[in-house]
């Protein structure tokens, strides 16, 4: 069911991608012939020096498990990783001798930590360094105390965040949006995810930095380049450099650094205390005496368990009424505002650290349109939240209402082999996977 | 320096290797067989060079450096290759992708080229959003411009290795979906689905890159 439009789109994409051929240097065959010899010698040398075959070396492999027993746990912890050293199973591979094994040894305390307490410094260009103390009981309880005394307490089990500002004695209670806010506050969880990705890489990805004096202490260091995994939900690209310095004798981490390519922010964790006793009372959501509760957001609705097709159709109908008959560019995000008012000014500002409140600045001239879009987005986007794990896509950008030949949205109901496709006239048909619109 | 133009289909394409060959080589590598390494090299060396060259900037020395580092690193870790984690080609390309990133991390030139390309894009006339979405073909002078090549390279470079290999195989090398599916032991439906996600990811990254403004702020969609 490929329309002329989708074929045309494919051709345009073809021409766009092929632009990378411009100035691309043709293979130097003489160079490649010489490299063949050099690389074969390198391979042989590696084989000769390896005392154990990959199968035999798996007794030292770390095995990773991701707890996903409940939706709450998945959403709350982003990825809670249990590390177990067992023999005979090769889950991820890549860890044998050399840098990766040594790296694994010194990051293991961080990965196995069930409580953590450390200082965090966020460095970004010429901006003042933002300092805070981070404490957590994994996976759900987090407390971050900023240098000005402001405290953010997050309880992922309750999906709540409490900000206490001792300077004006105000409190702000916020409901976290599942998936969107997860990970933003959880510095330990983010760190563990990066380490988990790094440790699954093989020796060549991990650079030994040798011995140096770090924060006045003798330390050994390792650095890992992470090529990135896209996460458009929180906008984190995951590309950057992860560096760890540890005590050469105890292997206790002294300093962990993460440089994020996409934001230019360098995060530094020091004074790490792992698996120390932390009193749960310090993560209480109770408003302390003397504080004034200034803002309480409405509790978000839980994720639905099934797709409400009629609700989605109604949302699209409401949108075309608002837009004058054209379906939106996307069903989520601030492009909805742009669709209604191209003059809206939406900027992403990364000048200062403002905790989980994010960095979005909106300056929209048409208040009416803005309020309407906010209303539509209040349940997580134009179509509202979809059930966890649903395979769906929106393909209606630019489609005019009434166009019965143009699909705008499709999804696969749970346990169904076929997809439900909504068209521009808001009719719905069942479609086999091979006939899905691109 | 010769420029590669349209001879990709005539040259070796690693997508043409069947899964049995892939398994044989993987097994040989794990057993420390030098023949397996030589087979892998013969199969992939030229294609790796071409793909690296596509992500770089017409500098033969830099391309050679990255290709060399990729194969030397791969030679040191080839015995640990696990076919359950993906094909040989994706494994090799993941190493290459990292080497390209490491190479550029040491240089300022790509950043300045990107800035120039972003500024060029900002002042372009035309339905730029439609170009990215594939609703309209960009003018020939845009398609042939060095700046567009820079933007596409940067967008590709930000994608996961699997997306890069799929997009380049399908849209740059011109491999059929069925061929790609057969060679990576997958179904055409799955490959189409992955390609759709890869295109979407590419468009998102491209949109983010091209909405850059000289003030240092990014406009989010």
Image (cartoon, coloured by chain):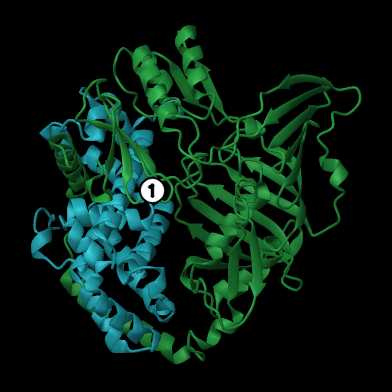
Quadrant housing the C terminus of chain B: top left
Expressed as whole percent of the image width and height from the top left, the position of residue A347 reads 48, 24
Quarter of the figure with residue A422:
top left
Expressed as whole percent of the image width and height from the top left, the position of residue A386 reads 48, 38
| Residue on which the image places disc 1 | B158
Is A83 above or below relative to A293?
Answer: below
Label 1: which secondary element: loop
Q: Residue furthest right?
A: A289
Q: Which chain shows up in cyan?
A: B
Q: Nearer the viewer, residue A335 or A150?
A: A335
Quarter of the figure with residue B74:
bottom left
Colour for chain A in the figure: green
Instruction: Specify the subunit that label 1 lies on.
Output: B
| Classed neighbour count for the residue bearing mark 1: other residues with Cα under 10 Å, few (<14), some (14–19), many (≥20) | many
Q: Nearer the viewer, residue B46 or A37?
A: B46
Quadrant housing the N terminus of chain B: bottom left
């Amino acid at each position: 069911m490929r329309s002329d439009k989708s074929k045309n789109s494919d051709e345009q994409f073809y021409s766009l991608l092929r632009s990378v051929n411009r100035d691309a240097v043709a293979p130097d065959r003489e160079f490649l012939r010489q490299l063949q010899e050099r690389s074969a010698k390198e391979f042989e040398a590696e084989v000769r020096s390896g005392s154990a075959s990959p199968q035999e070396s798996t007794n030292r492999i770390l095995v990773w498990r991701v707890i996903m027993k409940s939706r709450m746990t998945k959403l709350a912890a982003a990825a809670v990783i249990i590390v177990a050293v067992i023999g005979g199973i090769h889950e991820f591979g890549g860890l044998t001798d050399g840098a990766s094994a040594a790296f694994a040894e010194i990051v293991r305390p961080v990965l196995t930590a069930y409580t953590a307490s450390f200082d965090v410094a966020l460095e970004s260009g010429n901006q003042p360094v933002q300092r805070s103390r981070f404490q957590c009981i994994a996976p759900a309880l987090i407390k971050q105390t900023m240098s000005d005394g402001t405290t953010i307490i997050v309880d992922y089990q309750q999906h709540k965040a409490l900000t206490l500002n001792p300077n004006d004695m105000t409190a702000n209670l916020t409901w976290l949006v599942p998936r969107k806010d997860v990970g933003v506050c959880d510095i330990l969880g983010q760190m563990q995810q990066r380490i988990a990705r790094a440790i699954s890489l093989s020796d060549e990805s991990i650079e030994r930095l040798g011995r140096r004096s770090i924060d006045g202490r003798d330390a050994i260091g390792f650095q890992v380049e992470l090529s990135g995994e896209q996460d458009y939900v929180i906008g984190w690209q995951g590309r950057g450099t992860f560096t760890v310095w540890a005590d050469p004798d105890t292997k206790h981490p002294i300093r962990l650094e993460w440089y994020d390519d996409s934001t230019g922010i360098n995060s530094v964790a020091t004074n790490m205390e792992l698996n120390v006793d932390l009193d749960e009372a310090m993560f209480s959501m109770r408003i302390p005496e003397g504080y004034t509760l200034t803002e309480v957001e409405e509790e978000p609705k839980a994720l639905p368990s099934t797709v409400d097709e009629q609700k989605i159709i109604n949302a699209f109908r409401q949108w075309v009424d608002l837009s004058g008959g054209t379906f939106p560019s996307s069903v989520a995000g601030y492009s909805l505002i742009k669709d209604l008012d191209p003059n809206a000014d939406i900027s992403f500002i990364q000048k200062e650290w403002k905790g989980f409140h994010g960095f979005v600045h909106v300056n929209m001239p048409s208040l009416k349109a803005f309020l309407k879009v906010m209303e539509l987005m209040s349940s997580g986007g134009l179509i509202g939240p979809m059930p966890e794990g649903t395979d769906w896509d929106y393909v209606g950008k630019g489609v005019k209402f009434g166009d019965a030949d143009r699909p705008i949205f499709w999804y696969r109901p749970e346990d169904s082999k076929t997809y439900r496709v909504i068209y521009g006239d808001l009719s719905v048909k069942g479609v086999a996977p091979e006939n899905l619109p691109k | 320096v010769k420029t590669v133009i349209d001879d990709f289909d005539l040259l070796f394409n690693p997508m043409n290797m069947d899964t049995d060959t892939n398994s044989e080589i993987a097994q040989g590598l794990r057993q420390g067989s030098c023949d397996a390494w030589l087979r892998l090299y013969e199969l992939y060396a030229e294609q790796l060079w071409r793909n690296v060259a596509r992500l770089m900037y017409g500098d033969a020395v830099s391309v050679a450096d990255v290709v060399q580092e990729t194969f030397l690193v791969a030679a040191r870790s080839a015995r640990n290759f696990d076919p359950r984690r993906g094909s040989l080609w994706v494994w090799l390309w993941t190493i290459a992708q990292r080497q390209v990133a490491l190479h550029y991390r040491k240089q300022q030139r790509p950043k300045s080229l990107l800035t120039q390309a972003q500024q060029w894009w900002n002042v372009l006339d035309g339905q730029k959003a439609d170009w990215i979405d594939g609703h309209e073909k960009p003018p020939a002078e845009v398609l042939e411009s060095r700046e567009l090549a820079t933007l596409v390279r940067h967008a590709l470079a930000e994608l996961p290795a699997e997306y890069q290999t799929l997009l380049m195989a399908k849209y740059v090398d011109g491999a059929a979906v069925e061929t790609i599916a057969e060679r990576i032991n997958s179904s055409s439906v799955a490959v189409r689905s992955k390609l759709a996600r890869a295109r979407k990811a590419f468009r998102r990254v491209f949109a983010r890159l091209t909405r850059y403004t000289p003030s240092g702020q990014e406009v989010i969609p």
